[in-house]
């Protein structure tokens, strides 16, 4: 698994390194060569710059797709949880920090978060290239869209569950401030040479002159050529320019119809054969270093998000106790050991009485504090090998091995006694009470049978007001024989008989009180 984790990072770094190395070698060897060789070098350089632009866009898609698949989306309209996750992604993303949104497959907005004024409306024609790519089964990249004084582009990937698309995740970048603009500004491709990247409509998405970003590139046939996906050079006469004819080199980026272009006075281009190679190599080395750093950061964040998501699925973030997955694993392991050793296995279900009244009277923050306190008390009483989990809401469960008869009942009593100690929350004294159901298996049986019996026992304890209900499972079924509380201690002897048997406490638990 470890080598798989770093395969994508290593391969991406290798691609960028090889491209930069090829370009550096080409530029160094071009010095002193003929005019045609110099022109071929410019074409090769433009391909690399376009390739690096394409790599940048692909890296952005990788980060967006990681976020789309790493979160547990609710996909309900204006979900507070989804909006919070969209905000968290936007505030931490080094590539798409303008905003994010979730939309239905039909195009209907579900949840969204803009870091600035607003997100482009669904009617913006800039979404059309993105929509066509998504229909073709590819990630989508929009054209430049104007909103609230910002020029933004959108990246779109499907949100999948069990391999089936269920929604679309959109991430937005402000092209005036995104990293691609910084890269292009750092490039020094020769005297009075200007580098650009353009979208599929010929709008400048990055430029050496930041003031031109978001405007149409006026380069005549060169723009039409790069939008057609061609690679090469051409000359043109600008409408107003003191340098006469201009030479433009261009190449497609390979993503979303975007391309890269470099424009320079023709006379300056052919007069700089021996001076600009070193600068190009240096600029590409700087660009390589920046891309590698970005790759390392993205890889680290992706694995950190995956680790956090896995921990959230295993452990309850409120109480720190295990969740359903931990419970199932512990129960399966305990039953496997029971088949080898013959030791009994018990499941204890515990439900907080009148917990809803605490939430209603004191608020959910007080309810959370009570749940945290109860979880800590259960963990403090349970043995080191007992699994204590929170199943959800106000329900807890334990998997206990090796206890039968009085020993099991004593553990249940200690749990209830520990939880029943008064606690002050929001200035009010509360006496927590548990309704506990336990089921013990001494013969072969399935996890479902044991869990079901414990669940029924807990609800029976709550319904009768006894507070405790213990069921003995055997191969004879789930019939019950009830005993009064006096038989719980010390004369409890139901665990050696064929068939199930229940033990019920008789004292009714009061609700929470001060």
Image (cartoon, rainbow, N blue to C red):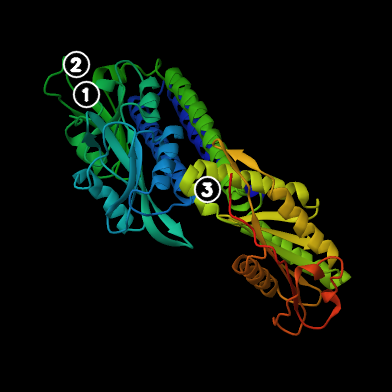
- Mark 3 vs mark 1: give the one in front: 3
> Do the residues bearing badges 3 and 1 touch, measured as CB atoms within 8 Å?
no
Neighbor class of circle 3 (other Cα within 10 Å; few <14, some 14-19, many 20+) is: some
* Location of residue 229 (image quadrant): top left
Residue sitting at x 71%, y 83%: 477
x then y, percent, for residue 206: 31, 29
Residue sitting at x 65%, y 62%: 508
* Location of residue 454 (image quadrant): bottom right
Residue at the disc numbered 3: 358
Does dot 1 land on a helix, a strand or a loop?
strand
Neighbor class of circle 2 (other Cα within 10 Å; few <14, some 14-19, many 20+) is: few
Q: How far separated are the C-alphas under marks 2 and 1?
A: 7 Å
Q: Is residue 447 above or below residue 415?
A: below
Does dot 3 land on a helix, a strand or a loop?
helix
Residue at the disc numbered 1: 246
The label on residue 243 is 2
Neighbor class of circle 1 (other Cα within 10 Å; few <14, some 14-19, many 20+) is: many
């Amino acid at each position: 698994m470890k080598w798989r984790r770093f395969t994508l990072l290593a391969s991406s770094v290798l691609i960028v390194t090889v491209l930069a190395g090829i370009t550096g070698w080409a530029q160094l060897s071009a010095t002193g060569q003929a005019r045609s060789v110099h022109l071929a070098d410019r074409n090769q350089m433009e391909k690399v710059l376009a390739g690096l632009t394409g790599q940048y866009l692909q890296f952005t898609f990788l980060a967006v797709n990681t976020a789309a698949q790493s979160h547990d989306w609710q996909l309900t309209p204006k979900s507070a949880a989804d909006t919070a996750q969209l905000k968290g992604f936007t505030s931490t993303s080094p590539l798409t920090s303008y905003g994010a949104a979730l939309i239905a497959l039909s195009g209907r907005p579900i949840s969204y978060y803009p870091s600035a004024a607003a997100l482009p409306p669904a009617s913006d024609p800039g979404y059309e290239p993105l929509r066509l790519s998504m229909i073709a089964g590819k990630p989508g990249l929009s054209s430049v869209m104007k909103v609230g004084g910002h020029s933004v582009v959108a990246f779109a990937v499907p949100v999948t569950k069990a391999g089936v698309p269920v929604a679309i995740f959109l991430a937005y970048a402000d092209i005036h401030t995104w990293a691609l603009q910084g890269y292009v500004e750092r490039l020094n491709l020769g005297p009075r040479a200007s580098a650009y990247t353009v979208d599929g409509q010929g709008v400048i998405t990055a430029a050496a002159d930041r003031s031109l970003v978001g405007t149409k590139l006026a380069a005549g046939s060169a723009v039409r050529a790069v939008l057609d996906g061609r690679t090469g050079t051409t000359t043109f006469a600008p409408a107003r320019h003191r340098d006469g004819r201009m030479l433009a080199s261009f190449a497609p980026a390979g993503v979303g119809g975007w391309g890269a272009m470099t424009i320079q006075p023709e006379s300056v281009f052919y007069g700089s054969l021996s001076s600009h190679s070193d600068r190009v190599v240096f600029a590409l080395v700087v660009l390589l270093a920046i891309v590698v750093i970005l790759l390392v950061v993205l890889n680290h964040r992706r694995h950190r998000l995956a680790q956090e998501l896995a921990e959230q699925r295993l452990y309850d973030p409120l109480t720190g106790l295990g969740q359903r997955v931990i419970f199932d694993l512990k129960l399966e392991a305990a039953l496997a050991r029971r088949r080898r050793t013959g030791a009994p296995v018990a499941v204890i279900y515990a439900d907080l009485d009148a917990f809803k009244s605490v939430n209603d009277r004191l608020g959910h923050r007080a309810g959370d504090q009570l749940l945290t306190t109860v979880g800590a008390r259960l963990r403090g009483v349970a043995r080191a090998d007992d699994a204590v989990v929170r199943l959800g809401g106000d329900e807890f469960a334990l998997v206990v091995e090796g206890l039968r008869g009085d020993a099991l009942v004593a553990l249940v009593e200690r749990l209830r006694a520990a939880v029943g100690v008064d606690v002050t929350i929001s200035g009010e004294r509360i006496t927590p009470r548990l309704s506990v159901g336990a089921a013990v298996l001494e013969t072969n049986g399935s996890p479902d049978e044991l869990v079901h019996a414990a669940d029924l026992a807990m609800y029976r304890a709550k319904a009768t007001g006894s507070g405790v209900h213990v069921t003995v499972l055997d191969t004879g079924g789930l019939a019950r024989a009830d005993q009064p509380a006096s038989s719980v201690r010390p004369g409890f002897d139901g665990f050696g008989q064929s068939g199930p048997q229940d033990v019920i406490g008789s004292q009714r638990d009061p609700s929470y009180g001060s």
